[in-house]
Amino acid sequence: MAERGVRKKMLGVVVSDKMDKTVVVQVVRLTKDRTYGKYVRSQSKYMVHDPQNKCQTGDRVKIIETRPLSKRKRWQVVEKIDSNR
């Protein structure tokens, strides 16, 4: 069976784990300024589905794009890369 499309993958740090089965992940990207060529750090926060409540604040995680799970959740935790403890 063929896969429907290419899903986006990102690495980020968990900044909040106060919800049930949901964590907030902050992703930091380096983008080059078009005019000056200097690298600028930009950051985004994503609501991410964590079905087993494994992630805690400070953990580095890999997330993948998925179908809409709620109003703001469109990402899911694939694996926990680094633990804060």
Image (cartoon, rainbow, N blue to C red):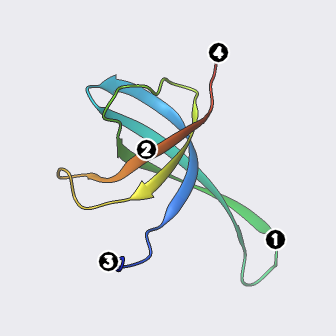
| Alpha carbons under labels 2 and 1: distance apart | 32 Å
Query: In terms of image quadrants, where is residue 24?
Result: top left
| Residue at figure coordinates x 34%, y 22% from the top left | 18
Q: Which three-letter amino acid code belongs to the residue tagged 3?
A: Met
Residue 28 in the image: above or below residue 84: below
Q: Residue furthest right?
A: 37
Contact (Cβ within 8 Å) of mark 1 with mark 4: no
Which of the two labelled residues, at mark 4 and mark 2, occupies the earlier sequence position? Answer: 2
Residue 79 place in picture, x, y as percent: 52, 41
Q: Amino acid at mark 1?
A: Lys
Q: Amino acid at mark 2?
A: Val
**Of discs 3 and 2, which sits in the foreground?**
3
Could you say which quadrant of the image residue 51 lies in? Answer: top left
Q: Quadrant of residue 82?
A: top right
Q: Earlier in the sequence, mark 3 or mark 2?
A: 3
The one nearer the camera, 23 or 32, is 23
Q: Kindly report which numbered mark, 1 or 4, lies closer to the viewer in this rendering.
A: 4
The image shows residue 6 at horizontal and vertical percentages of 44, 76
| Mark 3 nearby-residue class (10 Å; few <14, some 14–19, many ≥20) | few
Question: Which residue is disc 1 drawn over?
Answer: 38
Q: Earlier in the sequence, mark 3 or mark 4?
A: 3
Image vertical order of residue 6 relative to residue 15, above or below:
below
Who is closer to the viewer here, 3 or 51?
3
Residue holding disc 4: 85
Which amino acid lies under the numbered mark 4 shown in the image of this protein?
Arg
Q: Nearer the viewer, mark 2 or mark 1?
A: 2
Res 1 label: 3
